[in-house]
Image: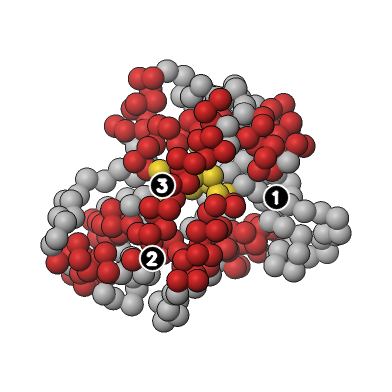
Amino acid sequence: VQTKGHSFVNVDLDSVEGVQRAVQGGLVSKELADVVLVQDVRLGSLLFGNGEDHIHADNEDISGTEYKGVMFALFRHPLDRTLSFFYHKQQDNESVHYDPSMEIYSLVDWVNSPSYITNFMTRTLVGKMNNQIPLTAVDLDVAKEILRRKCVVGLLDEKAESMKRFARLFGWDADVNHDSLSLLQGEAAASRAKAERWKNQIVNDEECEDKLLHINWLNKHRHPALREGSVEYKVVKSKNSFDLELYYYAKQLFEEQYTQLGFDEDDI
């Protein structure tokens, strides 16, 4: 799909069947996309690897073939995420998440309903998306370790800094951080990224960057804030206790990765 001079691959990665079709079409093996967006990390991981967990195309010779990716994410405070998602589903008829039946729900009604997934970030990392399956302290530790070992962390509250890090790390601008990418994906991948720099710079000046990241931020939707101490605040917080701890750990990683991945040497 061509949109405003850019190419996109329209695939459904929210189901095993959709991932299977993506693999059959060579989404990863044919390098059809530079970035893959997934809601369920473990489901998206089936696109990569060469073990028994990797879904492969029919008659595909996967001997000696290993598809690697680097996970990166822009983390948002769990309570803000829940509130924003609620209003997107309820009010934004241009959103893919819009659900007219949500008009009769209050925030508390929805959060207490079976359709709301508690501790979404933690559940998607450990593969326990069913609310009927309780999370444990071990699950939280596993989720933290996955982030520490596998994820380049960005923060929605630090959009500009996060996007600069992503751009430098993955070669989305003219100045690729070769050493950082080499640590995550290997020397060959780092060299290839450096040789095949992103042809169009995302942002060319500070004014455009400010408009993109703040004024015209994608899917920005104004809605009432969640008042601390209110009934709504307490209910949403109680449903996301693991995600809150995971979020604060992600903020810690964001600070640590500044030096660990060499961003302190990038003059960003």
**Quarter of image, res 135:** bottom left
Q: Secondary structure at mark 1?
A: loop
State the residue lying farthest toward the bottom: 132
Q: Amino acid at mark 2?
A: Phe
Q: Amino acid at mark 3?
A: Lys
The mark closer to the camera, 1 or 3, is 3
Q: Distance of mark 1 from mark 3, alpha carbons?
A: 25 Å
Q: Distance of mark 2 from mark 3, alpha carbons?
A: 14 Å
Q: Is residue 154 left or right of residue 184?
A: left
Within 10 angstroms of label 3, few (less than 14), some, or many (20 or more) residues?
Answer: some
Query: Residue 235, position in %: x, y?
Result: 22, 69
User: Which disc number belongs to residue 242?
Assistant: 2
Earlier-in-chain disc, 1 versus 2: 1
User: Which disc number belongs to residue 60?
Assistant: none
Question: Which residue matches tag 1?
Answer: 68
Q: Is residue 118 above or below residue 199?
A: below
Query: Residue 24, position in %: x, y?
Result: 71, 59
Q: Secondary structure at mark 3?
A: helix
Question: Which residue matches tag 3?
Answer: 251
The mark closer to the camera, 1 or 2, is 2
